[in-house]
Image (cartoon, rainbow, N blue to C red):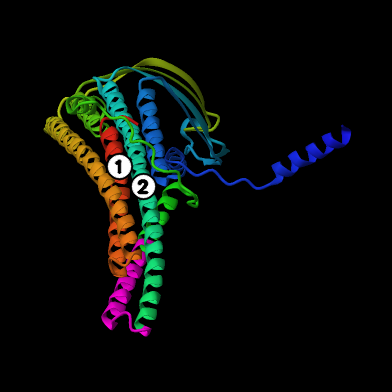
Amino acid sequence: MKRAATLLTAACLAALALPHPAAAQDLATAIADARAHSPALEAAAADADAAAARLAQARAAAGPTASVEGSVGTGRLDPGSYFGLTAQSVTPSAVQLVGEYPLYAGGRISAAIDQAAAGSRAATLGKDMARQNLTLATVGAYAEVLTARDLVASYGKLVDALGEIVRHTGLRYDVGDATSSEVAQAKARRAEGQAGLVQAQGRLTAALARLERLTGKPVGDLAPLPPRPDVPATLGEAVEAAVAANVLLAQADAGVDGAAAGVRAAKATNRPQLGVFAEGARIRDQFFPDYRADSVTVGLRGRWTFFDSGAGSARVREAQSKLSASEARLRQARDDVTQAVIEAWSGLDSAERALDAARDGDAAAREALRGTRLEVRSGARPPLAELDAEREAITATARLAEAQASVQTAAWRLRLLCGIE
């Protein structure tokens, strides 16, 4: 029993030591990798952090401030016998502490806070938009890699089959069972297949480079595309969702809020300001040797620019014009988003119909290829007919792969337009 247990343990350890095939990367993992790697997303997040910091600065303007200022030096002071004082070496110094708190700023501070809040919201939405654009780009690149790999595999098989056909046709020509034109046609088909393979390989290289650039990782085995993600059930629901949650529309709305706050800020520039302050000072060796002065002051400080030659009213007109422009951009954004949703909905519907047709075409082409092969084997049709059927089958497979990619991309585009991630 002990020997059997030892052998069983050794067998388990050996099985664990065997290399296991790496799991295929799926679409969700690729999207997560792209989000973790993207410099554009990192830059957008930094912009959002900067905007949040600007909001904190604007809010801080409503609170108290305190500052200290001081100086110290060495020199010689000659009062010119004034008050009987003679020239002496002095060490003049001064320290002043000032604290202030705004009581009334005419709406400047609240307007600045609202402007900064709108900017922060727009920057956060910009980060969301960057994430959505990255997601759509990753979905497209992932689907393109799968499509290109299918094409390379199909064209590779075709080139192998064409090479074999060329060899058989040459042998038949040598024994007088084929004509030179048949040999030339076979070689032409092979050249066409090789050209298609080269194009597919180039397409795959570009797709791999793009996906690797997006994810920051080498592209290994990829899992097939998942079922297309859910989208709103009707076009009306899709438009409603987009109006409520589309990032571009929300950014335009934030622009209107910021512009409205800009109008309030412009109107506040010619209003009075009032605040309380407290100052304390300590002065030594100023004005004459051994001079000393300590002071404490508490009071109100106000300012009112009641005439500025029309600069204030011009600022108000400028701000109101910016508000009008922002409102117009919001209306335009609403129209653009609605149109984009309609186009995306129609595009998804067309892509799904094309996918159904591509599935039927692929099945029919494969069935035709099987029948043609049997006819060629039986001698009922020439070998070149099999090549034509093979080429049609490859074309149908390519259409199917591209249709699947189109459905996936169209569904993601519609979801992102509706603010669904």
Whichever of callouts 1 and 2 sits on the residue coming sooner in the sequence is 2
Which residue range is magenta in the image? 174-201
Percent from the top left, x then y, of residue 162? 37, 69
User: In the image, what residue type sits under mark 2?
Assistant: Ala
- Magenta stretch encompasses residue 361: no
- Magenta stretch encompasses residue 192: yes
Q: Left of 353 or right of it: where is 159?
A: right
Kindly check if marks 1 and 2 are in contact, taking CB atoms under 8 A apart as contact: yes
Quarter of the picture holding the N terminus: top right
Q: Of residues 330 and 289, which is closer to you in this image?
A: 330
Q: Of residues 196 and 107, which is closer to you in this image?
A: 196
Q: Of residues 208 and 270, which is closer to you in this image?
A: 208
Mark 2 highlights which residue? 143
- Does the magenta stretch mainly form a helix, a strand or a loop? helix
Q: CA distance from mark 1 to mark 2?
A: 8 Å
Percent from the top left, x then y, of residue 300? 33, 16
Q: Residues within 10 Å of mark 1 (few under 14, many from 20)?
A: many
Asked which secondary structure carries label 1, the reply is helix
Mark 1 highlights which residue? 409
Q: Quadrant of residue 262?
A: top left
Q: Residues within 10 Å of mark 2 (few under 14, many from 20)?
A: many
User: In the image, what residue type sits under mark 1?
Assistant: Thr
Q: Is residue 291 above or below residue 136?
A: above
Q: Left of 282 or right of it: where is 265?
A: left
Residue at the limit of the structure toward the right, as seen here: 2
Residue 305 visible in the current orientation = no
Quarter of the picture holding the C terminus: top left
